[in-house]
Image (cartoon, helix red, strand yellow):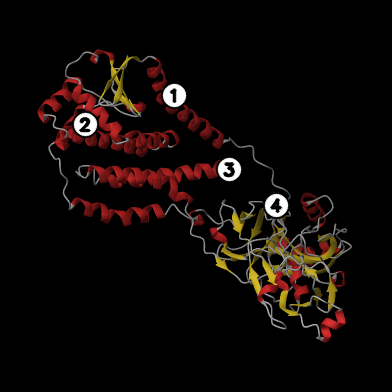
Amino acid sequence: MANEILTYLLKVSLGLTIISLSYLLLRNDYNLRIKRFYLLSGLIASWSFPFVRFPQFIEMGGISQSPVQPSSFVVEPAVNLTGAVAEGSGFNWLLIILIIYSAGGVFILFRNLVIIRLWRNKRGARSAYGNKIFFTDSNQAFTLFSWIFLPERYRNDPYIEPIILHERAHIRQLHFIDLIIVELTVLFTWFNPFTWLISRMIKENHEHLADREVLAGGVNPAHYRAQLLNFSLGTNYFRLGHQFSHSLTKTRFKMMKRTTARKTGIIKYLLMIPVIILALGMLTGSEVQDWDGRVKGQVIFADTGEPATGASIIVKGTTNGTTVDIDGRFELECKKDDILVISYVGYKTMEMKASWITGKPLELEFRSYELDLTKVKEKQKLELVEEKDKIGIRIVESDDNKIEPVIVVDGKVVEDYNNIDPEDIWSVEVIKDESSEIVKKYKAGNGVIIITLKEKVEAMSKVPTSAKATVDRKKKEEIFVVVEDMPQFPGGMEALKSFIYDNLEYPEKPKQEGIEGKVTVEFTVDTQGNVEDIKVVKSTYEGFDDAAARVFRDMPAWEPGKQRGHAVKVRLSVPVEFKLSEE
């Protein structure tokens, strides 16, 4: 979590750097309002762009009906023959960085809280131009929302009116909104010098805007400039300002001489927009991060926000997959260009490129169907109507009389039809003719609904789809690759690593020749937990194959995998690494 936050702040800082550097080309432009919009939108964009993702969602009508062929589900980590690597106890640089960062943030926060002290020490108030004016011990003038704060020494000054008009211009133009945003930015990215630069730019532009409004109100420009020099007034409003230096005053005087902006100046902004968007676009997406060969994510139901426990995550075109755990999270080994198929019964199946999956939860959209008897005629195919209501099949009544037809599924009368997955339905036919032989056969006064399920639908049980699905006991010989409860070696993963390490012998020939390698062993854990059908499916050196397979032949029984509470056969694979000791 700390690494993710640090990465995000670095991206924001990079965005602020891009905005501030590009603004240097516009600093002397006279389009003050456009400059204000540019700086403020640049701040917001810098905070927002790192969140932007461009995932490629593909809606599917349903999961493919092709049978899932037994393959491998990788159990990691690989076992290293040299033994477990001891965990390092290096210096915790991340903690040091966090402490320094927090200290800087606290300093910035307290620096701005001085406004509380000034507010408590304010004395006497008077109204002018619809705003309240307070006098404080501070040597600087500032505004807070609709209040103006002035130094006590100016209480009876007869030449204070231009200064009040200046501060009032800040209030009228809502400059405090910009300053709240910029000061929050400084608080969280104080380590970036360009953050301070963009803060100064925003305040400088505010002064130019306020000056322009004062002069537009009829104040004599020469008299106003003299006031600025005499008072050396800073607008440290909301403790987010700065004192006027001589160079800043000269810049302001220069801006005062130009009260209108060139229309051609807007072209510069228009030309810069695509360049800046392209630069900020580099901060978006998960492609910025290095791919480590695994994808992690979270899946929730869009309609409830609850974790999509039991949803299946399958690499498209393969049988490599996993299921979503009780917290809605999953982790899967795959390539960054692989397409993941996320599915759950009653919800729309989603496809997404693995590299686009980030910390943001994936939302499965609800989909259900109802059988509407009011919209069909006798012996006609019944249309499945989508409705965001509830999972399964629902009979709709056309009047107050309850419709109780006989439900026949694959030739068998059933009473509970609500658990039928609409994706498994091949066809639905309604027969209401009382003279029909079928109606007579079932003695169905209110008609018969004949539901025919798709062929080979049992094969789809290899891909976990719903916690409500059941396992056909007649199909126990089927081999699964992903189940709700995966097989467990006695003692867990660490015990498995220890067993392989203790029983694995390094072949003499590759040992003498200094050959190292990796072997992937595939095997099946049957319903009794026994290890069978052991095969080497991938090997970097043939001389390692027998040694690796021998360990699995001598392996004790596992705790069998379970699907919907029933023990089933599960195909697994374990990578075993042969590595010579450095000794």
Q: Kindly identify which residue carries mark 3.
A: 1
Q: Earlier in the sequence, mark 1 or mark 3?
A: 3
Task: For residue 68, say whether it is visible.
Answer: no
- The amino acid type found where label 3 is placed reads Met
Q: Kindly identify which residue carries mark 2.
A: 248
Question: Among all residues in the image, which is located at the extreme front?
Answer: 400
Q: Earlier in the sequence, mark 3 or mark 2?
A: 3
- Quadrant in the rendering for residue 79: bottom right
Measured in 3D between alpha carbons, the distance from the residue under mark 2 to the one under mark 4, in whole angstroms, is: 68 Å
Look at discs 1 and 3 and give the one toward the viewer. 1
The answer to which of 272 and 72 lies nearer the viewer is 272
* Residue at the spot 57% in from the left edge and 63% down from the top edge: 352
Q: Kindly identify which residue carries mark 1.
A: 110
The answer to which of 463 and 237 lies nearer the viewer is 237
The 10 Å Cα crowd at callout 1, few under 14, some 14 to 19, many 20 or more, is: few
Q: Kindly identify which residue carries mark 4.
A: 581
- Quadrant in the rendering for residue 578: bottom right
Q: Earlier in the sequence, mark 4 or mark 3?
A: 3
Query: Could you tell me which secondary element the residue under label 1 belongs to?
Result: helix
